């Protein structure tokens, strides 16, 4: 597999979006503190995000109306020791992969924690909050 | 508490109730009355997460693997209630499960991958301190990590 390199055409200040399924939100999860690290964790595949500059909140959450959305900058991903690689799809030109330092590119738990520390909620939909 | 040399494999696993297999046999039934309230709640939570369908995370994740589920059950039953009072369980993309202990500023993540590998991350004030693997299903190593988490003390206020 060819070595993947950091895509420097994605600026440090560029915002990357990742959806958060309700199953990852605990009753203790709050919108005013960074999201949990498992938002950026997969133990099998690389982490997919959308470039905000090439997408929209509506497009990113299309088909997932109960999902939340978090944002992190490409610079914060790099500061965590990871790289960002543009991976446009036919139906999603904004698609980007976050790749960690491990040979398989999967993020370590520490990398996930550090990226999550720099992330913030754009849309927070808790399944545990009941509207009155 | 149970002895520190206990391992995942030595714990009787409740391998039913979370899939479409035929009705459980007697040998599969877990002795629920012997579990604490916390253990029962965690077993139910894990069983619910084990039902998550393909693409549950909206990023094409497979369902939680039966291997991860079985190990998670064994963690709950093997640790005992004394170590489970501050823990949550969340799904991990790729088919895994994660236990999370949080006491004041200390945080411990114990992740069981879809293949059964078990990793941990210790953090304090959200700053990662150490990560690694739990070797050979060692409950003693896991208990040591949990003890570090729950031993956190509030900092003294500045005069």
Image (cartoon, grey):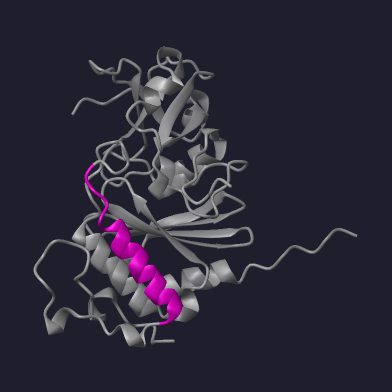
The N terminus of chain B - image quarter:
bottom left
Find the residue positioned furthest to the front.
A132
Q: Quadrant of residue A111?
A: top left
Residue at 52% x, 42% y: name it: A35
Residue at 27% x, 51% y: name it: B52
Q: In this picture, is A40 found above or below B153?
A: above
- Magenta stretch: give its range: B36-54
Residue at 55% x, 69% y: name it: B148
Magenta residues, dominant SS class: helix
Residue B12 rendering spot, x and y as whole percentages: 23, 80
Q: In this picture, is A33 found above or below B75?
A: above
Q: How many marks?
A: 0
Q: Quadrant of residue B42?
A: bottom left
Q: In this picture, is B120 found above or below B36?
A: above
Residue A28 rendering spot, x and y as whole percentages: 55, 54
Residue B137 rendering spot, x and y as whole percentages: 30, 71
Residue B49 or residue A111, whichever sits in front: B49
Residue at 50% x, 29% y: name it: A71
The C terminus of chain B - image quarter:
bottom right
Q: Is residue B104 left or right of residue B19?
A: right
Whether B44 is among the magenta residues is: yes
Whether A41 is among the magenta residues is: no
Residue B5 or residue B64, whichever sits in front: B64
Residue B130 or residue B107, whichever sits in front: B107
């Amino acid at each position: 597999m060819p070595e993947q390199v950091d895509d420097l055409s994605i600026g440090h200040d560029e915002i990357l979006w990742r959806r958060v399924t309700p199953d990852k939100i605990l009753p203790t999860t709050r919108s005013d503190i960074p999201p949990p690290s498992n938002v950026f964790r997969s133990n099998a595949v690389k982490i997919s995000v959308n470039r905000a500059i090439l997408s929209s909140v509506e497009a990113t959450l299309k088909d997932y109306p109960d999902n939340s959305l978090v944002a992190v900058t490409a610079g914060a991903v790099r500061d965590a020791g990871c790289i960002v690689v543009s991976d446009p799809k036919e139906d999603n030109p904004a698609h980007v992969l976050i790749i960690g330092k491990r040979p398989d590119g999967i993020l370590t738990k520490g990398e996930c924690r550090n990226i999550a520390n720099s992330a913030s909620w754009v849309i927070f939909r808790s399944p545990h909050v009941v509207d009155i | 508490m149970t002895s520190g040399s206990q391992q995942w494999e030595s714990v009787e696993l409740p391998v039913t109730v979370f899939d479409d297999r035929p009705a459980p046999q007697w040998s599969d039934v877990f002795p629920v009355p012997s579990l604490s309230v916390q253990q029962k709640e965690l077993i139910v939570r894990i069983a619910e997460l084990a039902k998550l369908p393909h693409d549950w995370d909206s990023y094409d994740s497979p369902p939680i693997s039966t291997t991860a589920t079985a190990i998670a059950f064994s963690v709950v039953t093997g640790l005992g209630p004394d170590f489970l009072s501050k823990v949550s369980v969340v799904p991990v993309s790729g088919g895994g499960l994660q236990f999370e202990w949080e006491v004041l500023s200390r945080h411990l993540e114990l992740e069981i991958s879809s293949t059964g590998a078990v990793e941990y991350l210790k953090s304090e004030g959200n700053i990662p301190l150490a990560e690694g693997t739990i070797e050979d299903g060692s409950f003693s190593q896991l208990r040591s990590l949990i003890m570090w988490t729950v031993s956190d003390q509030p900092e003294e206020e500045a005069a």
